[in-house]
Amino acid sequence: MIDTSILEFAKAKKYMPGGVNSPVRSFKGINGDPLFISRAKGSKLYDVDNNEYIDFCLSWGVHILGHAPQSVLKAVEDALWNGTSFGMPTPGETELAKLISEIVPSIEQVRLVNSGTEAVMSAVRLARAFTGKKKIIKFDGGYHGHVDHLLVSAGSGLATLGISSTPGVPEEFVQQTISLPFNDELQVFEAFAKYKDEIAAIIVEPVPANMGVVLPKEGFLQFLRNITKQYNSLLIFDEVITGFRPKIGGAQSYFGITPDITTLGKIIGGGFPIGAYGANKEIMRLIAPEGNVYQAGTLSGNPIAVTAGIASLKRLETPLFYETLNHKSRDFIFWLKEITKNKGIVINSFQSMFTIFFNENEIHNFEDVKKSDLARFELFFKKSVNKGLLFSPSQFEANFISAAHLPEDLNKTLDIVFQIVKTF
Ligand code: KE4
């Protein structure tokens, strides 16, 4: 039987570059053809041939509740009948902004935008305006969306596709960007010693997910907090993935580190296009129209996306949501580690997000990740798909567990992974 995804892919490539609207979906990095999806519910994803998959990509971390949660769909359905976009402010935007500012420790005020990239682009502009400085420090393998000046030694799709830097980005655009090894305090210290008062901010994924999941070494995030304070630079936590993931307040709440600016996305839109950046009022008051730092968006704070976001965050606030999710995740990761022992596999995890690295050694930064055996990852991924498991299609990405992943899903996954790695 012809695989309909292949037919769909052939058609798509006629009208869209690479047949996709975002590179990592193409499976190009793993020499595969993408699945075309027809629908999803809970922990399951169905391709256009109605093959069922237990989904650990979850739209790259969006669906912490699982796909198409009833409460979110109902709220969105009701909202749709009131219209979809007005280009004027709505009470729902205030409600979502209030929720975010009450939940995320560093945020007193927030600006809603349409993607994580937009949130990061705006946050960096704001940091440069607030400090009057130009240079930005990021970390090798960190990915903060496709904004020009951060496409330097980036992770996610660039690492997946082996794109080290991006044509079309003039050298001048990246001259103010310094990319350093994650977890390397000395190199951060040396950068500040060299550039002193030129550094506007450090932008960091507090737990990088875009080089696969890499944990910050004990004290590293606190070190970044201290050195930015010492040099009057800002600390930007890019929590597009970690926001609302490990606990309701995100990674900053989990580690007890308060950044100056936070970027958010994914989970806060419940599957609709969204991004956000926030900080204390002293910083946010620079944003137009209150201040002169311009940033705008036709669909920013879109009523439907905001409705889905509010409904999602309300579910996350229900008692024991995170205790249940994180307990289930810790259990699953424990057994995943047990069944992959002595197989040249390292598993890094942070509560309900994890990466299965085909690597012999511990992984603390992008250089470590790049030593992973991509051929074995590719084989594992393809065998998993054939058995009805969909992990994120890249060694340089994270996998996610949702509230909708049932014990039988996780046990079935462990059985299948055990069968696959037995052949390795
Ligand atoms: P978007 O512009 O894709 O909404 O967000 C960019 C972004 C910013 N910051 C972090 C930490 C992110 O992880 C992302 C986007 N994540 C990738 C997956 N790792 C999106 C998947 C894709 O590119 O299709």
Image (spheres, grey):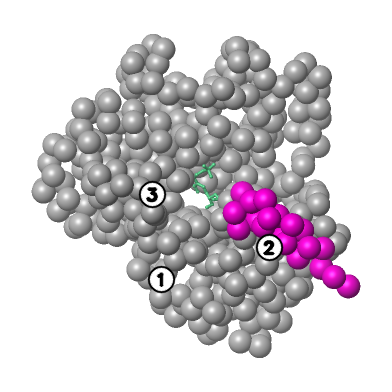
Q: CA distance from mark 2 to mark 1?
A: 23 Å
Element class at badge 3: loop
Q: Quadrant of the N terminus?
A: bottom right
Name the amino acid, label 3.
Gly
Q: How many badges with numbers are in the image? A: 3
Give coordinates of residue 101: x percent, y percent: 49, 24
The residue closer to the viewer here, 50 or 62, is 50
Would you say the residues marked 1 and 3 are in contact, meaning their CB atoms lie under 8 Å apart? no
Give coordinates of residue 387: x percent, y percent: 76, 73
Name the amino acid, label 2.
Pro
Which of the two marks, 2 or 3, is nearer to us in this view? Answer: 3
Q: Quadrant of the C terminus?
A: bottom right
Q: Earlier in the sequence, mark 2 or mark 1?
A: 2
For label 2, the residue is 34
Q: Is residue 77 above or below residue 383?
A: above
Residue 149 is left or right of residue 231, and the answer is right
For label 1, the residue is 370
Check if residue 79 falls in the magenta segment.
no
Tell me what residue is drawn at x 56 percent, y 22 percent. 298
Tell me what residue is drawn at x 76 percent, y 65 percent. 6
The reply to whether the residue tagged 1 has its Cβ within 8 angstroms of ligand 1 is: no
Check disc 1: other Cα within 10 Å, few if <14, some if 14-19, many if 20+. Answer: some
Give residue 168's mark: 3
Name the amino acid, label 1.
Lys
Give coordinates of residue 262: x percent, y percent: 42, 35
Give coordinates of residue 375: x percent, y percent: 54, 79
Of all residues, the one furthest to the bottom in this rendering is 423
Check if residue 17 falls in the magenta segment.
yes
Q: Earlier in the sequence, mark 1 or mark 3?
A: 3
